[in-house]
Amino acid sequence: MADTIIPKREDVPKEFTWDLSDMFADDAAWTAEFEALKALPAEYETFRGHLGDSAETLLDYLRLEDRASVKLSVLYGYANCKSDQDTANSFYQDMRGKAVSLLVGVSSAGAFATPELIAIPDGTLDAFYAEKPELETYRRVLYSVRRKKAHILSAAEETLLSAAGEMADSPDNICGIFRDADMSYPDAVDSDGASHQLTGGTFVPLLMSDDRALRKDAFEKYYGALGQFKNTVAATLDAQFKQLRFFSTARKYESTLQASLDATEVPVEVYTNLIDAVHANLDKMYAYVALRKKILGVDELHMYDVYTPIVADADRKISYNEAKETVLKALAVMGEDYTDLLKEGFNNRWIDVYENEGKRGGAYSSGSSRPHPYVLLNHKDTLDCMFTIAHEMGHALHSWHSCAYQPVCTSDYVIFVAEVASTVNEVLLMRYLLGRTDDKKQRAYLINHFLDQFKGTIYRQTMFAEFELMMGRMSENGETLTADALSEKYLALNRLYFGEDMVSDDEIALEWARIPHFFYNYYVFQYATGFSAAVAIANRILTEGKPAVDSYRKFLSGGSSTDPISLLKIAGVDMSTAEPINSALGLFGELVEEMKKLV
């Protein structure tokens, strides 16, 4: 498919769309299941006040939780995929809304469970384990609930907080619809006067162009159009942090950051230590920026020069089919059974490949593996998009392993480890490509891409994390998140991270308005920690072979069977220290020096 034409959904060839019939045969089947699952709240109600009555009652309740979890994840997964494939389709927006409402309703109906589970005396619970050995499956789950005793409210208060969940989801939903369905941009014009369609999906590919006039025009027009609605986006972010503050205060946390990280047993120090470690390594980022400026041969390096390859004439188109084949070869080190799973996903339409009008931007893996994972792409024939395939299929196969080897109750891995598998795939792909070329120009091109991964994943995501921390603290101090205040802080942060050799254009002050991850509750820092862990794991796989692969596969299969720091230790990485971050950024510095010799 041509990169410059954005088709309507119905015009996308079937083989490049995901096959959602693996979840439901059609919309009517979804509706029938939706109606049937409306009975779930009543089922939950039969257990209210009785979870501590007997081991059998507790086991029956936990099994209900498993059954509801599986059915609701499939119900929501179908609606969410349908909604994302065309966000302008009101029918599927309504379907997604219904699914969310049901999820909230079930959550509200089961809100009594947490305080009841906490109220069971330790001795009684020990007796339950002895009486019903089947409860051992749920020991980790019960521990996870009971460890948060200080932050759990009464049954009535928990019901109220649960019911507020749908309302709390509104800022993200509103801003997502605005960006993907309602927002439009003028065409960008290249140096020859030709027009190029500018969308959320084409923006970064246009910035990768070797035509500087096109990059500049796309950059200015994108932020010019977005800037007209900066107050709207700021208002949704202000609402987002207000709802985070509401829930964190209600649950007696000291901050929104602590509340968000405690959900996955990650200490706050891991977040702040990341920022400190990156600040201590900014000299390497400045060296990279200076090198980029020198190689591009520009008097001033602007923010619209950040994405274009600095060895531009080594760039080439990589078709979707070629990209898939290369990814399979690069990941062969993981074992034939791993690549067989990749082939299954490629061949059986787990993936929605190309952009269409109204389609959600970016890329993701569904995070569920029932009946199998689904992956959304907006593929262009670029090296970056080949890495996106490896990245998202890393997520997908992580989900597959967790669901295949864990019981339902511990099959969902926490977000702190979510970016590790995806990035291991990317690092293995890069090492594969570098190992198969001696051509200086091609090697420099690949190293530039690797450097950009470091820049984009450790430095950039840590900058986002620091900005998100700023927003949280502003909100907690009673400040309103206005567009002007956010732009001022963002521009200053951009200057800090890129240094004096980069012109921090006025437009970049608005970049916060295009980042959907600021609605994900302190998520982005995990890209940086995950990348650092992945560099270490990939290095072990390539140097130690099967023993490292085996320990890594145990990590992939771990789900949430233990805390995330312990899970990563299984794979040979200790994220309770700054060592993986410093080591990764040390490699970044070495790559910068190698690049200097190649160009």
Image (cartoon, rainbow, N blue to C red):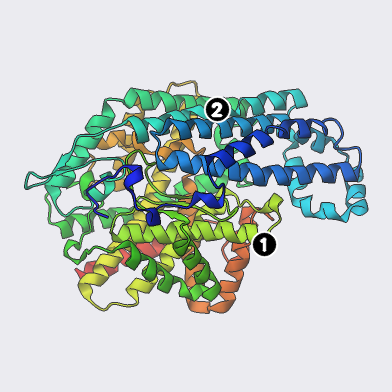
> Between 497 and 126, which is closer to the camera in this rendering?
126
Q: Vertical placement of 449 versus 111: above or below?
A: below
Disc on the earlier residue, 1 or 2:
2
Name the residue located 32 percent from the left edge and 30 percent from the top edge: 488
Tell me which amino acid carries mark 2. Ala
Name the residue located 55 percent from the left edge and 73 percent from the top edge: 337
Q: Nearer the viewer, mark 1 or mark 2?
A: 1
Q: Secondary structure at mark 2?
A: helix
Q: Vertical placement of 65 versus 282: above or below?
A: above
Q: Is residue 484 visible?
A: no
Q: Distance from label 1 to label 2 (Cα)?
A: 33 Å
Residue 437 location (% of width, % of height): 28, 77
Q: Vertical placement of 574 versus 441: above or below?
A: above
Going by the image, does 144 lie left or right of 589? right
Name the residue located 52 percent from the left edge and 33 percent from the top edge: 95
Location of residue 552 by image quarter: bottom right
Tell me which amino acid carries mark 1. Tyr
> Between 393 and 455, which is closer to the camera in this rendering?
393
Mark seen at residue 5:
none
Q: Secondary structure at mark 1?
A: helix
On-image quarter of the N terminus = bottom left
The residue wearing badge 1 is 405
Residue 23 location (% of width, % of height): 57, 49
